[in-house]
Amino acid sequence: MEKIQPVNGNALIRLEDTEGDKKVGGIIIPRNAQEKLHEGIVEGLAAGSTDEISIGDRVIYKEFSGTKIKHGDVEYLIVPVDDIIAKYVDVDEI
């Protein structure tokens, strides 16, 4: 089994699948017209690239960042770690 290992300060992000069509007031919006979320799950990191992000984190990345690839049936994005702008964290209170 092959695995993709990012190098040179990059991260491998598994893109989240957007299921189905969104309906707004009874109107079906085609998938190509829907707003795309710029988030995914970190599946791999280059060695020594960052201490703030780890594998398994759900992150938000810059809109026009990275290179989209497909490995098997899964779509990934390879982005520079510097283009990851936030990650989701669990908190008890806001």
Image (tube, rainbow, N blue to C red):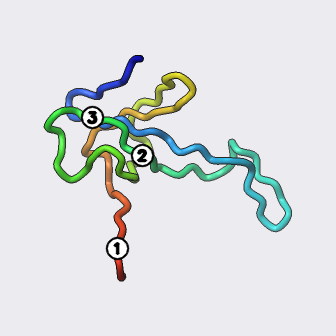
Image marks 3 and 1: residues in contact by CB distance under 8 Å = no
SS class of the residue under badge 1?
A: loop
Identify the disc placed on residue 41. Answer: 2
Dot 2 or dot 3, earlier in sequence: 3
Three-letter residue code for mark 2:
Ile
What residue would you read off at disc 3? 10
Q: CA distance from mark 2 to mark 1?
A: 19 Å
Local packing at callout 3 (Cα closer than 10 Å; few below 14, some 14-19, many 20+) is: many
In the figure, is residue 17 to the left or right of 71? right
Query: Which of the two residues, 25 or 52, is positioned nearer the viewer here?
Result: 52
Nearer the camera: disc 2 or disc 3: 2
Three-letter residue code for mark 1:
Val
Q: CA distance from mark 2 to mark 3?
A: 14 Å
Q: Position of residue 18 (x, y in %)?
A: 62, 47
Dot 2 or dot 1, earlier in sequence: 2
Residue 92 against residue 89 in the figure, above or below? below
In the figure, is residue 42 to the left or right of 35? left
Task: Kindly give the residue lying farthest to the front in the view shown.
Answer: 1
Identify the disc placed on residue 20. Answer: none
Residue 18 against residue 66 in the figure, above or below? below
Q: CA distance from mark 3 to mark 1?
A: 27 Å
What residue is shown at x 37% (from left), y 38% (from top)? 43
What residue would you read off at disc 1? 91
